[in-house]
Amino acid sequence: MSNQKNYAGSIALTKLQSAIITTKKGAKCILIPIDANYLTEKDGSVYINCNVVVKDEIDQYGNHGFISQKMNTEKYKELGKDKANEIKLPILGNIKNFAGLTNDNAGTTHIAEPINPEEDDLPF
């Protein structure tokens, strides 16, 4: 049986070099330059390479780790180790382990009670 861990997170796209614009109809948009943000284009899609760091200890904000941007291997090799390390790519967001937690309709988080197999009435 695999040991699956479920994490939720978010990525702050505005930490990338970007421009926030408003269209004539009032829609807010983010314009993100691909090359200036070390994004990767492949097969008609654009990707951001990330590292996910999971810590054993929960930090003061209740986070279990963070998501940071990383440079793709080709760009890293092109720039060289020293030049690539001078570029401070951003921490894009945090992660929380939500395994064993449930939310009620009021948005309150509760620890889920384990299921007792002897009390289970499922037919399988």
Image: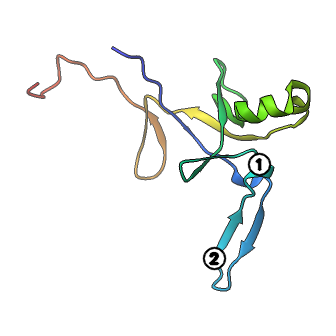
Q: How is the image coloured?
A: rainbow
Select label 1 or label 2 by which is in front: 1
The three-letter amino acid code for the residue at tag 1 is Asn
Residue projecting furthest to the top: 1
Q: Which mark is residue 52?
A: none
Residue 10 higher or lower than 51, as above or below = below
The three-letter amino acid code for the residue at tag 2 is Ala
Quarter of the C terminus within the rendering = top left
Residue 81 rendering spot, x and y as whole percentages: 86, 25
Considering the numbered disc 2 on the image, is that residue within a helix, a strand or a loop?
A: loop
Q: Dot 1 corresponds to which residue?
A: 37
Q: Residue at x 45, y 29 (%)?
A: 99
Mark 1 or 2, nearer chain start? 2
Residue 96 higher or lower than 34, as above or below = above
Quadrant in which residue 24 is drawn: bottom right
Quarter of the N terminus within the rendering = top left
The crowd level at tag 2 (other Cα within 10 Å; few <14, some 14-19, many 20+) is few
Question: Separation of disc 1 and disc 2 at Cα?
Answer: 23 Å
Is 99 on the left or on the right of 124, as rendered? right
From the viewer's side, name the closer residue of 71 and 118.
71
Q: Dot 2 corresponds to which residue?
A: 27
Q: Residue at x 66, y 35 (%)?
A: 50
Quadrant in which residue 59 is drawn: top right
Considering the numbered disc 1 on the image, is that residue within a helix, a strand or a loop?
A: helix
Residue 113 rendering spot, x and y as whole percentages: 36, 27
Q: Residue at x 74, y 72 (%)?
A: 21
Quadrant in which residue 27 is drawn: bottom right
Residue projecting furthest to the bottom: 24
Is 109 on the left or on the right of 20, as rendered? left
Residue 54 higher or lower than 32, as above or below = above
Residue 115 rendering spot, x and y as whole percentages: 28, 23
Q: Is residue 70 visible?
A: no
